[in-house]
Amino acid sequence: MDKKYKVKITALLYEELTRDVEAWKIAAYIYDQVRMELKSGKDFEIDDILAGLVEFWNMDAEVMNGGYSQCFFNGYAKNPVYIKAFLKFLGNKNILKNFEAAHGVYKANKANFEKERKGQWSDFQDIVENPDLAELKRLSSEYYVIGNNLYEEIRQKIVENKDVFFWVIK
C-alpha cells in the first residue's frame, strides 16, 4: 500500500471538480489541501508529481503576474526538480523547455537576484531592467502564449491519474 500523502476528497466533490468548466479549480483544490497539510507541521512523504503540482502552481502564479523575473526575485522555482518532474508528467515539452531556459538564465544570474533581494522591493526594477536578464522577459512572453490552455491539460492528467493525487472517499 502506498504510504505517500494524497489529498482526501469525497467522490461527489471529485466529480464536481473534474467536470467544472473552470479547469484550474481542481488544481487549486489540491494546492490548498497540500498547503494546509504542510502548515499543520505533520511529517509526511509526498509524491514528486504531487509536490511538482504545488511548486508549479506557485511558479505559474508568479510568472503570470509579473514574469519569470518576479518569480525568481520572490524566491519561487529556485529548485526546479519538482516542477520539471511535474511538467514531464504532463508531457508538455514546450512549457518544460521554456521553464528550463528561464531557470538557466536565473542560475547564470543568481548573484544578481540574491543581491537585489536583500534590498527593497524597488530593487526589483533593477532586475527587470538588467540587460543580462532580457531573455527572461522574452521567455515570460512566450510562456503567456504557450501556457494558455495549460490548466485544461492539468485537469486531464489529474483525471487520468487520480491515484497519484487523491484518496477518493465516499
Image: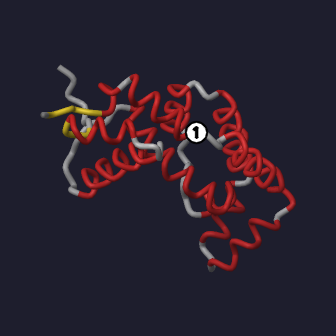
Q: Residue 144, image x and y in percent? A: 70, 49
Residues packed near mark 1 inside 10 Å, few (<14), some (14 to 19) or many (20 plus): some
Q: Is residue 165 above or below residue 1?
A: below
Side of 135 relative to 86 (left or right): right
Q: Locate the N terminus and report the quarter of the image it occupies.
A: top left
Q: According to the image, label 1 marks what residue?
A: 150
Residue appearing at x 32%, y 33% in the figure? 165
Specify the amino acid type for callout 1: Leu
Q: Residue 86, image x and y in percent? A: 50, 33
Side of 102 relative to 75 (left or right): right
Residue appearing at x 74%, y 47% in the figure? 105
Q: Residue 9, image x and y in percent? A: 22, 40
Q: Nearer the viewer, residue 160 or 33?
A: 160
User: Total of numbered circles in the picture?
Assistant: 1
Secondary structure under the numbered disc 1 in the rendered image: helix
- Which quadrant of the view contains residue 91? top right
Q: Which residue lies most toward the left here? A: 170
- Which quadrant of the view contains residue 63? bottom right
Residue appearing at x 53%, y 28% in the figure? 90
Q: Nearer the viewer, residue 41 or 10?
A: 10
Q: Locate the C terminus and report the quarter of the image it occupies.
A: top left
Q: Nearer the viewer, residue 115 or 16?
A: 16
Residue appearing at x 27%, y 58% in the figure? 39
Q: Which residue lies most toward the right here? A: 131
- Identify the colour scheme used: secondary structure
Side of 156 relative to 143 (left or right): left
Side of 140 relative to 16 (left or right): right
